[in-house]
Structure formats: C-alpha cells, structure tokens
C-alpha cells in the first residue's frame, strides 16, 4: 500500500504553516479516547491541532449514536458548518465514530449535508490517511464504514488534551447485546488488548506525570476472556496497581452480570484503585432486566453491593438508569426506586429510553406515553436528590483525597474529584491544579462538596 502519511506530509511541505485540524468527540470516554488516537494519526501527517473551529483546515466530529438526542445534536452542528464551508471551500469536513458507522447516517449525510467531505466508521483509523489523501487530491467526498478486522491499533500515539487525567482503553467493542443498545452494532465484537500493552501504556503515563488513569471498556469485567492466555480484570488491576508512581486508578463500565467478589477484593486491596464502582443498574425490575437482556436480577445486583459494603461500609456506587423502557409499568418503576433507596448511590446518570433502530427493543410496541416517562424521570431525580443530599452530608468533617483539575466558577476556588468521584471545591491557589490534596469537608451542596485544604 502506498505510504499515504508520507504523501500527505509531502503535499503540505510547501506551506508556510502546518494545516490545522479541529476535532470534537461526543459520547462516552471510549469515543473521546478514539478521538485522541485520530488526532495522533492527523499529527503524524503534519496537522497541528486547534481549538478554534473558524481557523481550522479540517473539522472532524467524532459522533455518538447511543440516543436519538446525541444524533440530532450532531446533525444540527453539521448543518451549521455549511456557512464555514461556503466561506472557505478548501475546508474539509469529516464525520466519524459510532453514528458514522451506520449506513443510514451515510445515506442521510450524502443526501442532505453535501458539504461533508469525509465519513469514516469506528474501524477505519488505519484507513484515515488513505481516505484523507483521496479527499485532498481528488476533491470528492469519501466514505468508509467497512468493518475491518478490528485489530487494535497499538502503534498510534494519542494526542491528549488533558495533562492530569488519562484514559486507557483495555478493550473494544461489546458482545452483550442489551436489547435497547446500539453499541454492539456500531463497535463490533469484544476484543481485549494484551495485558503487556496496557501495562506499558500506564507505565508511560505514570512516568509522564499523569495523576489519574481511567481504564475503559464497555464491560471491563469480561476483560481478557478471549485472549490466547486469558487474564481476568481483577488480575490486570492488581498488576497495574504495582506500577510505581503517584497516580490513582479508575475504571468503567462494570457490567453487573460479570461483577465478582474477586473484583471487589482487588479494588479494596489495591491502594491506587479508587473505592468507587460505577455499576449500571438500568432497571430494578427483574421483568424489565430480562427484556433488556441484562442477564442479572435485582437480587444478584444487591449481592455485589452488599458484599462491597460488608468490606467497606461506605463503599461508593454510581449507576446508569434507563427510564421508560417499552411497557415499563408503575410497579417496575417502583422496583427501580427501591434499589435507589437501598443502594444510596452517590451519583446517578439517568436517561429516558430512546428507540435505536436495528435493536431488539425497537420492535416492541410501547404503550407508555412520553408524559408518563418524563413524569417518572422527574420522580427519579427528585428521589436521588434527597439521597445525594443525605449521602453528601455524611462527608462533613471528614477528610477526602482530591485531585484538583481546574478553577471553580467561584472566585478564588479550585475544584477536583474525590476518590468517590464527587466534585469537591476549596479555596486554593491555581497552583494546586494537577495535584492531589487532602481536603477537610465543611459543606455539602446537592452537586458538590466544599472544604478546606489541609
Ligand atoms: N457499556 C456500558 C454502557 C454504555 S452506554 C454499560 O453497559 O454499562 C451508557 C448508558 O447509556 C447505558 O448504561 C444506558 O443507561 C444508556 N443507554 C444505552 N442505550 C440507551 C437507549 N437506547 N436509550 C436510553 N439510554 C440508553
Ligand atoms: Fe450497550 Fe449493554 Fe454493551 Fe453496555 S453492555 S455497551 S449497555 S450492549
Ligand atoms: Fe460511546 Fe456513544 Fe459510541 S456512548 S460507544 S460514543 S454510541
């Protein structure tokens, strides 16, 4: 294959300044991490990175398809780019990521958004130089959503915006096929990175001074099952924990069907691992969980929570909830509220069910009205607000380990996240940004804690 990276580099060599690319990733952290790799490939070809869209020679939206809202937002933003393209016909506009991986998106873009030059899916990172070269030289739109072999690109250097926290994907794809979810269709089958590759990357990040490493996968608990020498996620965590350096470790997401005592034990034993688990519940009703193809019951879910709390009474949990899955009854919804009361999450991320065509749940005829669904959402958030309020108050007087990552809106204050993944702000000089500090909590708000530096 011709060396397209080199050919593009040469094509740019006569320019006074390097061409600039602007990339924005929507959706989950996995997608953000892919965006960092795409930037890595673009920088190899000679692009510089800009945060200013108006000055860019190449604009890429790295999209998410998980809910309809995410897709509508992208269409509206892509529509807005038409003006920029009219003012600068040399501008290249690209769309990639999960939404781009769907045939129907390519058709719609080709039909109604003709100013888009480049569409590539979630498998096409390696093809990007070839695709971009075609756009640059042939001045015609190109798209590629082929499901290439899914080999994990280990030789691409990510370009990371953040110098404090870094994400490290440990696996790609998903095999779970939860009935509502588009992810397995746009990201393909589950594949794990070799433990050696993960350990090397974490080692490099620790040496570069990163203070927090987030291990990523759609279901980290099934990590390593298909490797030629199988490794469990708990084993991987223990190995990463041994890497020298002053950093903490987080991971997401954990699927409850694969969450084990072994995992909880590893989290508790490993000093660097935050004592917090993001454990998406989705629903507290066994009937709905079955229709969702989640393959656990509310009882099994509570066993994990109870085990963690039997070892650390204050173990912190957060979760994802879907409200209004097709034909969810009031009783089903009450079951979800019950689990919220039992677990007392520190934080929840809740979503109204969104039909994704191509998934199994999209075929179910739904009798629940939109009003009813939004009413339930309001009640869910109200209950969680009371719970967070109570949970957060318990921190007053206690000392938390906070990694400061920015200035807060309040003059003279900086903010960061505690081990429990809770926002904490404190009066502090911006020089604390990038450092872990002990903070004594003095006040609790509904969305954050406030305290004093020790
Ligand atoms: N792999 C992760 C979740 C990835 S998607 C896991 O299983 O935990 C993030 C969240 O989006 C899901 O947990 C779910 O709560 C929500 N979600 C996914 N598909 C959805 C849909 N069709 N409608 C509404 N919410 C959805
Ligand atoms: Fe979607 Fe389920 Fe896979 Fe998560 S585990 S990405 S919700 S199919
Ligand atoms: Fe993530 Fe959205 Fe894709 S949640 S995996 S970017 S569909």
Image: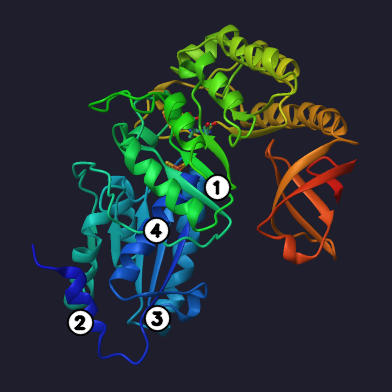
Give x and y (percent) for residue 397: 91, 36
**Between 352 and 132, which is closer to the camera in this rendering?**
132
In this view of the protein, can residue 141 be seen by the observer?
yes
Q: Earlier in the sequence, mark 1 or mark 2?
A: 2
Which residue matches tag 3? 86
> Relative to residue 197, is residue 347 depicted above or below?
above
Of the numbered discs 1 and 3, the one sitting upstream in the chain is 3
Give the percent coordinates (x, y) of residue 132: 24, 68
x 43%, y 77%: residue: 56
Q: Earlier in the sequence, mark 4 or mark 1?
A: 4
Classify mark 1: helix, strand or loop: loop
Mark 2 or 3, closer to the camera = 2
Classify mark 4: residues with Cα within 10 Å, few (<14), some (14-19) or many (20+). Answer: some
First in sequence: mark 4 vs mark 3: 3
Q: Give the number of marks.
A: 4
Residue at mark 4 to residue at mark 1: CA–CA distance: 21 Å
Q: Is the residue indicated by label 4 positioned so its CB lies within 8 Å of ligand 3?
A: no
Residue 155 image offset from top left, x and y in percent: 27, 54
Q: Name the residue under label 1.
A: 245
Discs 1/2, front: 1
Marks 1 and 2 sit apart, C-alpha to C-alpha, by: 40 Å
């Amino acid at each position: 294959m011709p060396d397209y990276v080199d050919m593009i580099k040469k094509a740019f060599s006569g320019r006074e300044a390097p061409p600039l690319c602007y990339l924005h990733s929507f959706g989950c952290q996995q997608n953000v991490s892919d965006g960092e790799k795409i930037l890595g490939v673009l920088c190899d070809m000679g692009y510089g990175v800009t945060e200013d869209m108006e000055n860019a020679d190449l604009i890429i939206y790295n999209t998410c398809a998980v809910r309809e809202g995410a897709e509508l937002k992208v269409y509206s933003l892509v529509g807005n780019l038409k003006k920029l393209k009219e003012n600068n016909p040399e501008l290249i506009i690209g769309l990639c990521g999960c939404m781009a991986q769907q045939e129907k998106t390519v058709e719609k873009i080709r039909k109604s958004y003709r100013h888009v030059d480049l569409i590539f899916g979630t498998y096409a990172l390696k093809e990007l130089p070839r695709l971009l070269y075609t756009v640059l030289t042939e001045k015609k739109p190109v798209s590629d959503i082929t499901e290439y072999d899914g080999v994990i690109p280990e030789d691409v250097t990510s370009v990371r915006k953040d110098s404090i926290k870094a994400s490290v994907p440990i696996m790609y794809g998903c095999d779970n096929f939860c009935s509502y979810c588009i992810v397995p269709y746009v990201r393909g089958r589950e594949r794990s990175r070799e433990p050696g590759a993960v350990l090397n990357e974490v080692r490099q990040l620790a040496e570069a001074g990163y203070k927090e490493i987030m291990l990523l996968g759609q279901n980290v608990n099934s990590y390593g099952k298909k490797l030629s020498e199988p490794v469990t996620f708990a084993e991987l965590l223990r190995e990463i924990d041994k890497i020298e350096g002053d950093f903490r470790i987080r991971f997401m997401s954990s699927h409850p069907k694969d969450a084990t005592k072994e995992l909880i034990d590893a989290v508790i034993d490993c000093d660097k691992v935050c004592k917090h688990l993001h454990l998406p519940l989705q629903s507290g009703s066994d009937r709905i969980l079955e229709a969702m193809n989640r393959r656990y019951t509310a009882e099994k879910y509570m066993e994990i929570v109870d085990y963690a709390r039997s070892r650390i009474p204050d173990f912190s949990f957060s979760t994802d909830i879907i409200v209004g899955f097709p034909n969810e009854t009031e009783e089903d919804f009450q079951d979800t509220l019950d689990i919220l009361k039992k677990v007392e999450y520190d934080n929840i991320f809740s979503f109204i069910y969104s039909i994704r065509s191509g998934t199994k749940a999209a075929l179910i005829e739904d009798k629940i009205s939109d009003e009813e669904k939004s009413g339930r959402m309001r009640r869910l958030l109200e209950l969680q607000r009371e719970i967070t309020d109570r949970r957060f108050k318990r921190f007053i007087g206690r000392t938390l380990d906070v990694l400061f990552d920015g200035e807060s809106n309040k003059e003279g204050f900086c903010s960061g996240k505690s081990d429990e993944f809770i926002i904490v702000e404190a009066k502090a000089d911006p020089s604390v940004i990038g450092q872990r500090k002990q903070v004594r909590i003095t006040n609790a708000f509904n969305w954050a804690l406030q305290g004093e530096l020790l």
